[in-house]
């Protein structure tokens, strides 16, 4: 067996209500001036009030940056880094979904001014020093709080990734209370997003290893057991915490065994049509898995028992059942299951396929090679 490495943040805190004492967490990093990164939706939901109060009670200066949009642009990243420099931040905290966390990672790195964003896209190109970093997710989906990855929208239809262990935070905080108010459709899309991370990590052609496998399996078990619960009863804090932990474990898994064609085909959908990332993944997931069956059916069959404990039958039957369960789950939870339902027409599909071919960092991990005609056929299957 080839050797492998495993990376994760220095510290993980799992505690309902932990965000309300974020000042204590920042103080452990010797923070005096904090850049707090979030978005307008999180701010309007009131989720920043108690953290802001506690930071100030601890005597810290706080600069709030809430201009992060979905699929954040390079300009937003640069603006956040400039704000960090202007307020002389010595710590960056993100409270939000994947977009604020991605921006915070790069703002913490770029704040010192000794590296340019254009120079660090790709794998292993980000070097130097960054400010202390604390990431607090408000959705159970991206797992960004434990990944060395930040995704930036660099132009129409194009996303680029910065991948480097320097982006792993010092502390990740899972506070289920922050997720209690999530609408059911957001809980559903982000939950399936986390499932995608677990499935793609488990079937990744590159860097799959026993540790990532264990994390992916437990992530899928937790997510499958609690997804419907949080969509039915958003105030179920036990289920909410289970989803956060599941998403977190899936994040650790794909941080080490990278994701593949589902993400490669989902990114253009999000970048060109502003479809939320979790929903973009959900839309293409079943079709990509069917495409992969010839190469990944044994692994899909292994995962099927985590969502369908009583399942029997042949390997191929169990793999097909997993794909069916995932597609049915999206429909049951009220998510769109066709590209046409999010405003994407047949004439748009060739451009999406072209864009997907640019995602070589992801496509190289897929169990089966994906070419332009393959991508186009997958998009047509879910049109």
Image (tube, rainbow, N blue to C red):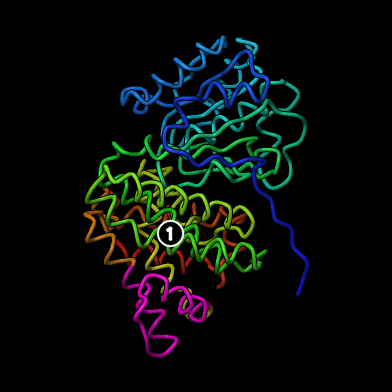
Residue 61 vs residue 176: left or right? right
Report the number of discs: 1
Measured from the top left, where is residue 231 in percent x and y? 26, 50
Measured from the top left, where is residue 342 in percent x and y? 27, 49
Badge 1 is on which residue?
195
Residue 289 vs residue 6: left or right? left
Residue 85 vs residue 294: left or right? right
Closer to the camera, 45 or 379?
Answer: 45
Q: Classify 10 Å Cα crowding around label 1: few (below 14), some (14-19), many (20 and above).
A: many
**Residue under the image location 58 percent in, 27 percent down:** 25
Task: Say if 166 sits above or below 207 in the image.
Answer: above
Q: In which quarter of the image is the C terminus?
A: bottom left
Task: Say if 184 sits above or below 104 in the image.
Answer: below
Looking at the rendering, which quadrant does residue 283 occupy?
Answer: bottom left
What is the magenta range? 296-325
Residue 313 colored in magenta in the image: yes
**Residue under the image location 54 percent in, 36 percent down:** 102
Measured from the top left, where is residue 201 in percent x and y? 56, 62
Task: Say if 24 sits above or below 209 in the image.
Answer: above
Closer to the camera, 171 or 185?
Answer: 171
Q: In which quarter of the image is the N terminus?
A: bottom right
Q: Residue furthest bottom?
A: 314
Measured from the top left, where is residue 114 in percent x and y? 76, 23
Name the chief secondary structure element in magenta.
Answer: helix
Mark 1 lies on a secondary structure that is: helix
**Residue under the image location 34 percent in, 65 percent down:** 380
Closer to the camera, 111 or 1?
Answer: 1
**Residue under the image location 44 percent in, 49 percent down:** 268
Residue 79 colored in magenta in the image: no
């Amino acid at each position: 067996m080839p050797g492998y490495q495993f990376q994760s943040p220095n510290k993980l805190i799992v505690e309902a209500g932990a965000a309300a004492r974020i000042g204590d967490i920042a103080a452990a990093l010797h923070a005096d001036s904090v850049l707090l990164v979030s978005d307008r939706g999180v701010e309007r939901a009131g989720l920043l009030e108690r953290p802001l109060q506690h930071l100030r009670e601890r005597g810290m200066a706080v600069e709030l940056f809430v201009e992060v949009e979905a699929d954040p642009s390079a300009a937003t990243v640069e603006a956040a880094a400039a704000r960090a420099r202007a307020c002389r931040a010595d710590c960056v905290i993100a409270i939000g979904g994947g977009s604020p966390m991605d921006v915070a990672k790069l703002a913490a790195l770029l704040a010192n001014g000794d590296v340019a964003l254009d120079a660090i896209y790709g794998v292993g190109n980000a070097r130097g020093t960054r400010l202390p970093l604390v990431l607090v997710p408000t959705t159970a989906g991206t797992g960004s709080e434990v990944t060395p990855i930040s995704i930036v929208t660099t132009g129409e239809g194009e996303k680029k990734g910065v991948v480097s262990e320097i982006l792993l935070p010092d502390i990740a905080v899972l506070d289920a209370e922050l997720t209690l108010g999530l609408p059911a459709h957001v809980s559903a899309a982000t939950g399936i997003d986390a499932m995608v991370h677990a499935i793609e990590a488990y079937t990744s052609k590159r860097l799959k290893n026993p540790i990532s496998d264990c994390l992916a399996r437990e992530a899928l078990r937790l997510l499958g057991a609690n997804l419907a619960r949080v969509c039915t009863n958003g105030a179920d804090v036990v289920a909410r915490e289970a989803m956060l932990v599941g998403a977190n474990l899936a994040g650790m898994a794909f941080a080490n065994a990278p994701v593949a064609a589902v993400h490669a085909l989902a990114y253009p959908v999000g970048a060109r049509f502003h479809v939320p990332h979790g929903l973009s993944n959900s839309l293409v997931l079943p079709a990509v898995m069917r495409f992969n069956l010839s190469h990944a059916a044994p692994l899909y069959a292994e995962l099927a028992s985590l969502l369908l404990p009583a399942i029997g039958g042949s390997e191929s039957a169990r793999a097909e059942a997993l794909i069916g369960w995932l597609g049915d789950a999206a429909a049951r939870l009220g998510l769109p299951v066709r590209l046409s339902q999010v405003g994407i027409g047949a004439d748009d599909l060739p451009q999406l396929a072209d864009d997907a071919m640019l995602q070589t960092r992801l496509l190289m991990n897929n169990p089966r090679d994906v070419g332009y005609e393959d991508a186009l056929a997958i998009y047509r299957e879910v049109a």
